[in-house]
Amino acid sequence: MNIIVEWMTTLLKWLYSLTAVIGVPSYGIAIILLTILIKSIIYPLTWKQMASMRKTVDLQPKLQAIQKKYKDDPQTMNTKVMELYKENNVNPAGGCLPLIIQLPIFWGLYRTLFNFNSYITDPSQTHFLWFNLTQKDPYYILAVLAAATSFLQTKVTSPTSAASGNDAAATTQKTMLYIMPLFMGYITATVPSGLGLYWVVMNIVSVLQQLYINHKLDKEKEKAAA
């Protein structure tokens, strides 16, 4: 995992030098650029994730019919569900891939910020806006922003129609909508502010990407229906 930290440190330093070239040297801006870069790179995976999720929503009536028909035969039910997914080119685990990819990046950035003081030339470089990138946000503003943007991201990402007619799905979706933002807010309050900044920007970019993807998928669905 050390190689991830080395790459992250090198990339962050290069982005900082880029901000210096344009006349606004800032590791805070470098982290924002890093976040946008990461989200741009994994956008194709995000697109596949949401397209697969949308297909899963459309398959809900068929899934519920299978579950009802084979409720006393779990093995056959699972086989039929997997066949349905395969026929419609849906990967039920595909939604986890973007998150899995981001976890080592998050960890690498954490270790990079942990060793921040070992490669900066001026202690003032750790300051951005009202906080120190290597320390916790003293005012918990980033934690509140992380919770709010996580809520918004979950809201625009969750396929609400997937829960219709399915009490278990509705309960799970509602839990994710309210519990996860609170959890992310708590995590943000306990880690260096640089990570909090990364997470807030990540959520904002994710929301913008999601709105675009939703619009594009809606257009494709309308076109297919026509």
Image (tube, helix red, strand yellow):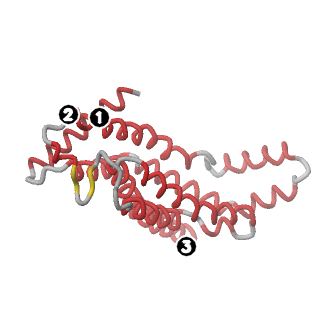
Q: Image point 28% across, 53% down: which residue?
A: 32
> What is the number of the mark on residue 115?
1
Judge whether 94 appears above or below 210 on screen.
Answer: above
Q: Amino acid at mark 3?
A: Ala
Q: CA distance from mark 3 to mark 2?
A: 59 Å
* Count of number-bearing discs: 3
Judge whether 211 appears above or below 44 on screen.
Answer: below
Marks 3 and 2, the one that precedes in the sequence: 2
Label 1: which secondary element: loop
Residue 171, position as x, y percentages in the image: 69, 64
Q: Is residue 138 left or right of residue 176?
A: left
Residue 53, position as x, y percentages in the image: 58, 57
Residue identified by numbered label 2: 119
| Closer to us: 47 or 156 | 156
Quadrant in which the N terminus appears: top left
Judge whether 124 appears above or below 108 on screen.
Answer: below
Residue identified by numbered label 3: 226
Q: CA distance from mark 2 to mark 1?
A: 8 Å
| Closer to us: 13 or 184 | 184
> What is the number of the mark on residue 165?
none
Q: Image point 27% across, 35% down: which residue?
A: 9
Residue 192, position as x, y percentages in the image: 35, 47
Quadrant in which the C terminus appears: bottom right
Marks 3 and 1, the one that precedes in the sequence: 1
Marks 1 and 2: in contact by CB < 8 Å?
A: yes
The local crowd at label 3, few if under 14, some if 14 to 19, many if 20 or more residues have their Cα within 10 Å, is few
